[in-house]
Amino acid sequence: MVATHHNPTDAEILGRDEANDLDGILALTNTDVQSAITTVQNNADSIFTWNYEKGERPRLNKLYEKAKGAMWDGEKDLDWSTEVDIDLMVEQMKVASQLQNTSLYKLAEVPGSPLRNWGEKEWTDLSRESLVWQMSQFLHGEQGALVATAKIVETVPWIDAKYYASTQVMDEARHVEVFAKYLDTKLDDHYPINVHLQHLLDDVIEDSRWDMTYLGMQIMIEGLALAAFGFLHMMTEEPLLKKLLRYVMSDEARHVAFGVLSLQEYYENLSLAEIRERQEFAFEAAVRMRDRFLRQEVWHRMGIDDAKPLLRAQLEAPPEEKEFQRLLFSKIVPNCKKLGLLDAGEGWLRTKFEEINVIEFEHMESTDEEYADFALES
Ligand SMILES: [Fe+2]
Ligand SMILES: [Fe+2]
C-alpha cells in the first residue's frame, strides 16, 4: 500500500497563518529568562549496538580520525590577554556592514519608523547591541549543539557515528567555553536565548526519531552557524575574535559534513511520506532561524516599544537588501539538495525555499565535499 501524505498548511507546520505572519512571530516571547535552567523532554530511545566493526562506514571513520587530531584548546591556543577595543570593533563592523549592503540604516526610512530621528550615537549603540546579541545567540546555539550531539551519541545505531559524535560533544564543549569567555571577559554583557532559537532547539531535542536531531542540528542549525561565523569572521578585524571564529569554523565544517554523510545513507531507505516529514521539519527550522534574525530583543533593549514597522520592513525587504539573511542559507540549501530533500515529493522544499528567496544557493558545494578546506592546517 502506498502511504498518502496529508499536505499540511503553513499554519499546521508553523503554528501560525503563514511564514511572514508578523503577529504570529511576535506571539512568541521569552518569558522564562530569569530561570537558571530549562528542562526539555527527550523522547528518544538510547541505542546499544553490538556491531563494533570500525570503519564499516569509511567516510564517517575518516571524519572521526580527523577529529581526534584536530582538537584545539580554548585556553592555550587563544590569547586571552588581547585587549579588545569594543568601540573600534563596533565602528569597523558598522563600516563593513554598509559596504556589504546589509545596512540597517534603511530602516530609518520606513514609514512611521521609530528610528527616523536617530543620530550616530543610537546607530553605534545598535551595532554594539547587535554584536552582543549575535554572540549570545551563538553561545546558546553552541550549548544546543552540545546537548544535541550528546543525544546523537546515545540514539544513533552505528558505531562509526557514535565514535564521531563523541568527538563533536568535546568540540561543542570548547565552543560553549570560548563564546562564554569572550562575552564575559571582552564584551561584558549578554542576552538570553532568542525565543525562536529556543523553540527550534526544543524540537531537535524532543523528537523521538534520531535522524531528526541530525537534520535539525547538523544540517540546519550548524549549517546556518557555519555561514554566520564565516560572515562575522570576514567582518571583524578584532584578532582574538577572528582567531576564535576560525578555530570554531574548522570544527563546524566537520560537524555539518557528519550530518550530510549520515543522513544520505539513512534517507535512501525512507518512503516519500517519511521524506516529506523531513522536508517539513527542515522548512520549519529555516523559518524559525530567519525569525530569530529579526532580533526582537535588541529592539526592545533599544527602547523601541513598537518594533512592528521595523520587523515588517525586514521581512518584506527585497532580496538584494537582505544579503546577510540570505547568505545564512548558503550552506543549508546545497546540503538539503545533496540529501535529496529539495526535489523529493514534487519539489515541495524547493518551492518553500523559493518563497523565502534562498534557492539560488542550491548550486554551491555541499559541506561533505568542502569540509577539508576549513581545516586549520590548510
Ligand atoms: Fe559548535
Ligand atoms: Fe558544531
Image (cartoon, rainbow, N blue to C red):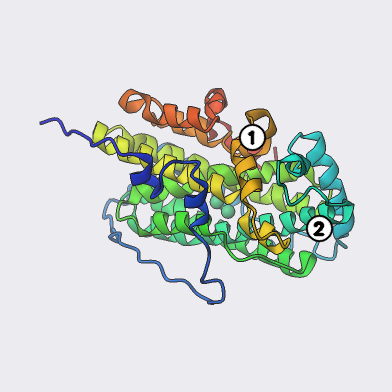
Q: Give coordinates of residue 369: x percent, y percent.
A: 54, 30
Where residue 203 sits, quadrant-wise, is bottom left
Question: 139 and 303: which one is in front?
Answer: 303
Q: Give coordinates of residue 186: x percent, y percent.
A: 79, 65
Where residue 226 sits, quadrant-wise, is top right
* Marks 2 and 1 close (CB-CB < 8 Å): no
Q: Residue at x 85, y 42 (%)?
A: 95
Question: 240 and 344: which one is in front?
Answer: 344
Q: CA distance from mark 2 to mark 1?
A: 23 Å
Under circle 1, the secondary element is: loop
Q: Residue at x 58, y 32 (%)?
A: 370
Vertical placement of 223 versus 180: above or below?
A: above
- Left or right: 145, with 208 as reference point: right
Disc 2: CA contacts within 10 A as few (<14), some (14-19) or many (>=20): some
The furthest residue to the front: 112
| Residue on which disc 2 sits | 125
Q: Residue at x 38, y 50 (%)?
A: 15
Q: Does residue 378 show up?
A: yes
Disc 1: CA contacts within 10 A as few (<14), some (14-19) or many (>=20): few
Where residue 87 sits, quadrant-wise, is bottom right
Amino acid type, callout 2: Asp
Number of labelled discs?
2
| Residue on which disc 1 sits | 317
Amino acid type, callout 1: Ala
Q: Is mark 2 within 8 Å of ligand 1?
A: no
Question: 375 and 179: which one is in front?
Answer: 179
Under circle 2, the secondary element is: helix
- Left or right: 264, with 255 as reference point: left
Q: Does residue 63 show up?
A: no
Lower position in the chain sequence, tag 2 or tag 1: 2
Q: Give coordinates of residue 146: x percent, y percent.
A: 51, 60
| Image quarter of the C terminus | top right
